[in-house]
Amino acid sequence: MNPETEKLMQQLDQQYEGAAMKPLYTATVTVTPGQAGHARMSGHAHSSDGLLDLDLAFPTELGGHGKGTNPEQLFAAGYAACFHGALALVARKAGVDASKAKVTCAVTIGRDPADGGYMLAAQMVIDIPDTERKKAEQIVAQADQLCPYSKAIRGNINVRMTVV
């Protein structure tokens, strides 16, 4: 790990005790509808810092043209990246090299049998090369407790974690 990354990891690993959330960063994204008048079908997402600038579209599996990303892909990317960050912190504390770890997240949208609306489910596949399976499972369980995405969706979205 390079010195700059090591310094950042140490900062992220500092304990915090307080009565309220201590904001560290806020991401702001604005979504506008495209010609369909419905951003999920044809829209555009743009972040306040300009780093995110992409078209949104229904995937072909849902009858769309598929020429843009969609909320499920964005959620999967965010969850996988966030979980990988938590995994790296936990692995570091455990003395495990997670520099080649891979987190794959699949997010499914479907109909909700409870109310007829829509719901999400997620499947996480985590690979920590050269790590004993039991140790990898312990690291994944601890990362799941640390990850802000996992905390936000716990009890709301069915998530299946698989260590390979």
Image (cartoon, rainbow, N blue to C red):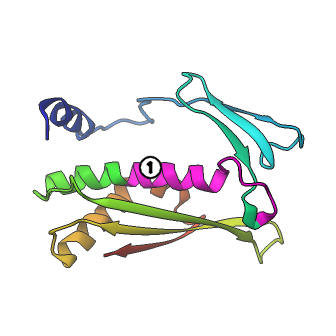
For the record, the magenta segment spans 62-83
Q: Quadrant of the N terminus?
A: top left
Q: Give the percent coordinates (x, y) of residue 102.
A: 32, 60
Left or right side of 122 for 102: left
Residue shown at 74%/62% (left/top)? 60
Identify the residue position indicated by label 1 in the image.
148
Crowd rating for badge 1 (residues with CA inside 10 Å; few <14, some 14–19, many 20+): some
Residue shown at 23%/70% (left/top)? 136
Which three-letter amino acid code belongs to the residue tagged 1? Pro
**Secondary structure that dominates the magenta span:** helix
Where on the picture, by quarter, is residue 64? bottom right
Q: Give the percent coordinates (x, y) of residue 54.
A: 64, 36
Q: Total number of numbered labels?
A: 1
Magenta segment includes 69: yes
Magenta segment includes 19: no
User: As displayed, is residue 139 above or below residue 33?
Assistant: below
Front residue of 82 and 2? 2
